[in-house]
Amino acid sequence: YDNPHEALTRIKRHMLTQRAFKEVGIEFNDLYACLVPCYSMEPLEKITDAYLDQYLWYEGEQRHLFPNWVKPADSEPPPLLVYKWCHGVNNLTDIWDTSSGECVVMMESRFEKVHEKIDLTLLSRLLRLIVDHNIAEYMTAKNNVTINYKDMNHVNSYGIIRGLQFASFIFQFYGLVLDLLVL
């Protein structure tokens, strides 16, 4: 790690060529009310994933991938969001007029355990729409890894692993797709 150029070259090479990954260890922290999974990964793979995460969020911000209605966002706190939403609804002309049979509808949807239900094949196809196909394949292959707990092994073939560095980007993007499908 003394040479940043060499480290960056190694990271790029891993993203372009590596499709078989070392197994991921999992341990559970017992909080008495629930179990929290803690994933342990190879340090070099974690560095590569952290670089990819920073790159994805940077490019997403530069290209305005996530529209301003994807909330909550870092740009405004939730109380300000509620205030702006109420102010926007009340300032619409004839919003409460129901003389012609129209009505105002506010819809709320609840998605539960989305990270466990993401299909990796569909995720790969969706990611190819916004990133290079090599990066999309890397991201889906990284989720299709062997998870090791004590003496048991499991190959993850459905759902994303929340312990990955770029899992937040995948979840935010998949949530955006779900929002657009609900509309």
Image (cartoon, rainbow, N blue to C red):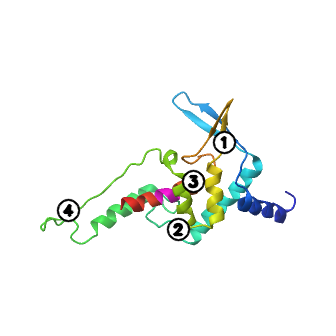
Inter-mark Cα distance, 1 to 4: 51 Å
Tell me if mark 4 has few (under 14), some (14-19) or many (20+) residues whose alpha carbon lies within 10 angstroms of its own. Answer: few
User: What amino acid is at disc 3?
Assistant: Ser
User: What amino acid is at disc 4?
Assistant: Cys
**Label for residue 103?**
4
Tell which circle, 1 or 2, labels the residue nearer the N-terminal end.
Answer: 2
**Label for residue 146?**
1
Tell which circle, 4 or 2, labels the residue nearer the N-terminal end.
Answer: 2
Tell which circle, 3 or 4, labels the residue nearer the N-terminal end.
Answer: 4
Q: In which quarter of the image is the N terminus?
A: bottom right
User: What amino acid is at disc 1?
Assistant: Thr
Tell which circle, 2 or 3, labels the residue nearer the N-terminal end.
Answer: 2
Whether residue 71 is visible, yes or no, is: no
Give the camera-side residue of 138 and 72. 138
Tell me if mark 1 has few (under 14), some (14-19) or many (20+) residues whose alpha carbon lies within 10 angstroms of its own. Answer: some
Which residue lies most toward the left here? 99
Inter-mark Cα distance, 1 to 2: 31 Å
- Which residue is drawn at the image coordinates 56% and 30% (left, top)? 31
Q: Do the residues labelled 4 and 2 touch (CB within 8 Å)?
A: no
Give the camera-side residue of 154 and 56. 154
Which residue lies most toward the right here? 2
The image quarter in which residue 154 lies: top right
Tell which circle, 1 or 4, labels the residue nearer the N-terminal end.
Answer: 4
Tell me if mark 2 has few (under 14), some (14-19) or many (20+) residues whose alpha carbon lies within 10 angstroms of its own. Answer: few
Reading the image, the residue beneath label 2 is: 65
Q: In this view, does 154 lie above or below 1?
A: above
Say left or right for 123 vs 134. left
Whether residue 97 is visible, yes or no, is: yes
Can residue 175 be found in the magenta stretch? yes
**Label for residue 168?**
3
Give the camera-side residue of 15 and 6. 15
Q: Do the residues labelled 2 and 3 touch (CB within 8 Å)?
A: no
